[in-house]
Image (cartoon, grey):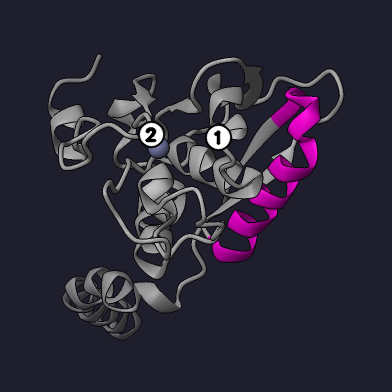
Amino acid sequence: MLARTAVRTAIAGITLLLPLVAVAPSASAATVAPAQVTITYDASQASEYADAIAQGIAIWNEQLENVQIDEVEPGGDPDVSFVADPGWPRAEIGPAMPGDDLTVWFGKEGVDEGYDLVRIAAHEFGHSLGLYDNKPGPCESLMSGSSAGVECTNPVPNAEEVAAVEDMYAGGLVRQHAGTGKIVVEQVTGSPAPKRWSVPLDEATASPS
Ligand SMILES: [Zn+2]
């Protein structure tokens, strides 16, 4: 009986502790290694831009912890496909997850206007990762895209853009997946900039298509 009472007392003690235990993970989330999502891309349909695409992907991989981007194995099924295209660069909005089939159109119009190839690749893949345009915006913003001018060659997302992607893939879960499949049409050079170019995340989530 003494032993049983001791066990009951121990259980009661554990039960009392549970609420504290449940609170602990969120309080120390920053120190817990997040589950990582791995997505794949293919550049075989945009082979003339393969180097720029590889550089753009490498930049994202250097910045991100919660999602890893790998080139798809030969014969594999990529989650994001780069396709060379005669039009303006554009992309389907993510955040891409394993099993998705999103497209980035590496548009020649943007290339011919002189926009930096690595910035184009990294910017469009930013859409694949779930980011919308930040137009008009400064050169230090990757998602400002063409609005930063043709002389802007920065292919690196700023801290805010990195944090937004990290947040979407945090814990291996994508919280804003409802926007997937929408095509983000880029601003054509010379057109007036101060308008919204795409659906904000909250509206996209409210009305999934
Ligand atoms: Zn864009």
The kind of residue on which mark 2 rests is Thr
Instruction: Say which residue label 1 marks.
Output: 113
Residue 190 lies in quadrant: top left
For label 2, the crowd category at 10 Å Cα-Cα, with few meaning under 14, some 14 to 19 and many 20 or more, is some
User: What's the distance in space between the residues labelled 2 and 1, CA to CA?
Assistant: 9 Å
Q: Would residue 182 be counted in the magenta stretch? A: no
The quadrant the N terminus occupies is bottom left
Q: Is residue 178 above or below residue 67?
A: above
Q: Position of residue 44 (x, y in %)?
A: 79, 23
From where the camera sits, is residue 24 visible?
Answer: yes
Q: Earlier in the sequence, mark 2 or mark 1?
A: 1
Q: Quadrant of residue 42?
A: top right
**Amino acid type indicated by mark 1:** Glu
Q: Is residue 117 left or right of residue 95?
A: right
Residue 165 against residue 129 in the figure, above or below: below
The image shows residue 132 at horizontal and vertical percentages of 32, 40
Under tag 1, what secondary structure? loop
Residue segment shown in magenta: 42-65
- The residue labelled by disc 2 is 189
Relative to 154, say whether 102 is above or below. above
